[in-house]
Amino acid sequence: MELTERKKKVLRSVVDLYIRTAEPVGSKLITELPDMNYSSATIRSEMADLTAMGYLEQPHTSAGRVPSAAGYRLYVDELMADYRLSLDETKSISTAIEEKMQQVDKMVEKVAKLVSQATDLPAISVASRYGGVTVSRFDLILAGAGSVILVLMLSNDEVVNKLIKLPVQLEETDLKLLSALLNATMTGLSVQEFDQSLLDRIMRSAGAGSCLVPVIMEFTTQTLERQTRTNMAVAGQMRLLGHPEYRDVDKAQRLMTTLDEEALSNLPAVMQNANGTQVLVGAENVARELKDTSVVMTKFDIGEGMQGMIGVVGPTRMDYAKVTARLSYFAESLSKMFAKPEQAQLPEAKSGKEEQ
Amino acid sequence: MELTERKKKVLRSVVDLYIRTAEPVGSKLITELPDMNYSSATIRSEMADLTAMGYLEQPHTSAGRVPSAAGYRLYVDELMADYRLSLDETKSISTAIEEKMQQVDKMVEKVAKLVSQATDLPAISVASRYGGVTVSRFDLILAGAGSVILVLMLSNDEVVNKLIKLPVQLEETDLKLLSALLNATMTGLSVQEFDQSLLDRIMRSAGAGSCLVPVIMEFTTQTLERQTRTNMAVAGQMRLLGHPEYRDVDKAQRLMTTLDEEALSNLPAVMQNANGTQVLVGAENVARELKDTSVVMTKFDIGEGMQGMIGVVGPTRMDYAKVTARLSYFAESLSKMFAKPEQAQLPEAKSGKEEQ
DNA sequence: GCTTAGCACTCAGGTGCAAAGAGTGCTAAA
DNA sequence: TTTAGCACTCTTTGCACCTGAGTGCTAAGC
């Protein structure tokens, strides 16, 4: 059977209405739409066809129609009207992002929170670095009262520090010597190259500062390891409860536990080869628990060998147009922000063409 | 009417059973308890008395009894058997805490998560500082490639840093000069004392480094302000759904929104004058939304003019004995940890006397 | 005087059934 | 090709009814 223009129009109406009401859509409801100059009987026969073709489903004989996974797929790929962000919306997203986000792990949390807020759905935010971070510079600062501040500058321009209480008294010159030694031997080395022989070598040459070396080594290793780990945050889980399909507490809970745990950590893999905004409808999902749930996600650039991803999880009935619009606006804004760290330029509101 | 020993025993049994089952407790159920050598009729008359005295309530005529707020109060204050933490429990709490917690804001989050895990309830964790943090030392490190690392050491021994990209080329000596100037003029000043005249004064003397001054000022102000803010984190909100009284999604949602927002920020005030573990039963709560919910909270010390608080929120029917035991163990462990930052000693398991 | 057995009473929750309502598929006429 | 009409299906809702749990009271027993 051929998918005529009118069939598409009916399908789109069904999905649109279903997104709004979360109730099965009947033929009569559709006839009441503006631009629908057919009787309910005509719509009925079209709907019967669409059901036969697998785009719609019927919960039971005397109920209205509900989009099937295939129906959503078609909707997302072809039918969905571009959602046009209003000035208000871009503005509130912009000001939210503008607050400076200092470190990557903090950033991940904040972004998750913002995205969740903007979409009224639980959101995840991931930042993964593809390894290779090294220390590009060591500094030791004597900070009075028997303590030293260790400052590491990393190859990705992040800076971390640690306060070390000194067991013995050390002179400024001792620290100069030690930091020079560290800079000479350890900069540019990845964490895998740290080993016992390196430690021995440094200890031998360290002189008065040798008691600091183990602490420094441990902190450095820890820091570099944390850098390669992918950061991930989940926010706004409770928002799920606002949507009728999750009034079943058990279901919501099961879904959120999945989200909290690792099951989702393989989503970034799915993301890897795809570009732009991706929509996973219901059954297309990897994780069991997400079977009747959809995921929308987008990549964004953080530069310096890093990559971010933001996504939301929600009922298959979610308002894809709105969600994808907001998500990609976020991603765009974030990418720009990381491109010019100090003065983030926000993109123009995407002026999508309004179909129909 | 007098509250006899036997009445107390009955009341305790009712609360214990209700905590376990979340169902109204009938007279017959109580007779089945070991150590209860009375007939159901006797228990019934005792329960009728307890109801008249306001310690029990009846959802409807033919239902069992449920503890009233006053009943819980009495239970918490007098009747409750000390819960004895098993070795397993102390161990899992200990190892959880042992992971080093670096910065205060990170700490707050982690603690909230741990407490929530240990009690299977939503948890809040607050760390508030009573002001007065100043910068005790400035350092500027030239980090090659036209950038400078600014390191601030604060009066509470926390260290923060920021990477600044240089608009112009600066020499090591310029930075030395500037940092000496900053140390001379700005250390020990609280954020309220930063004003235009101070900025002007520094700008005049800064020489080549003057272009850095505004950035440094802003970052310093921001940092000190963040230090005085109280950090607060909420974790495990979804756990609420596991308890039957919150199967009503709307209720759970309303409660959690309250928790997420500020309504709870006045709880620390309640905490201020009290010591030890506090239990707020139902109607005793400040916030509207918490009316049929209980809050258990404890203070702990962070030293350095700071104070922490952990608490959980849950159904009035929660297992007070278990929750208070775990909470105070946490608080104890944390206090000890901050007393000797580097090698946390964990307290012995509290060996409470087992009554009855 | 306290305790207990017995009994009548109350009320929430489950079950079965009928009516209402929503929506469908099919057919015949326009 | 579209539409009006109609019979059919299935869920939802309301209602009456029954059952079981639990109570309060009373009178008898220790």
Image: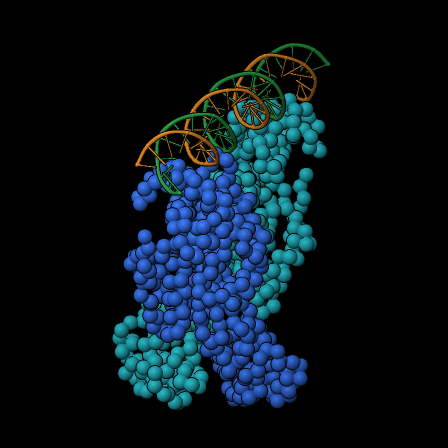
Chain colours: A cyan, B blue, C green, D orange
Camera-side residue of D12 and B221: D12
Name the residue located 32 percent from the left edge and 76 percent from the top edge.
A214
Name the residue located 44 percent from the left edge and 50 percent from the top edge.
B3
Name the residue located 42 percent from the left edge and 69 percent from the top edge.
B102
Q: Is residue B178 left or right of residue A153?
A: right
Q: Quadrant of residue A168?
A: bottom left
Camera-side residue of B169 and B352: B352
Position of residue B215 relative to residue A326, above or below, is: below
Q: Is residue B122 left or right of residue A23?
A: left
For the question of whether residue A280 can be seen, the reply is no
Point out residue B206 in the picture as x, y percentages from the top left corner.
60, 87
Point out residue B164 in the picture as x, y percentages from the top left corner.
54, 75
Point out residue B353 in the picture as x, y percentages from the top left corner.
32, 59
Point out residue B14 in the picture as x, y percentages from the top left corner.
41, 45
Name the residue located 31 percent from the left edge and 83 percent from the top edge.
A210
For the question of whether residue A83 can be seen, the reply is yes
Q: Quadrant of residue A115?
A: bottom right
Q: Is residue B160 left or right of residue B218?
A: left
* Numbered disc total: 0
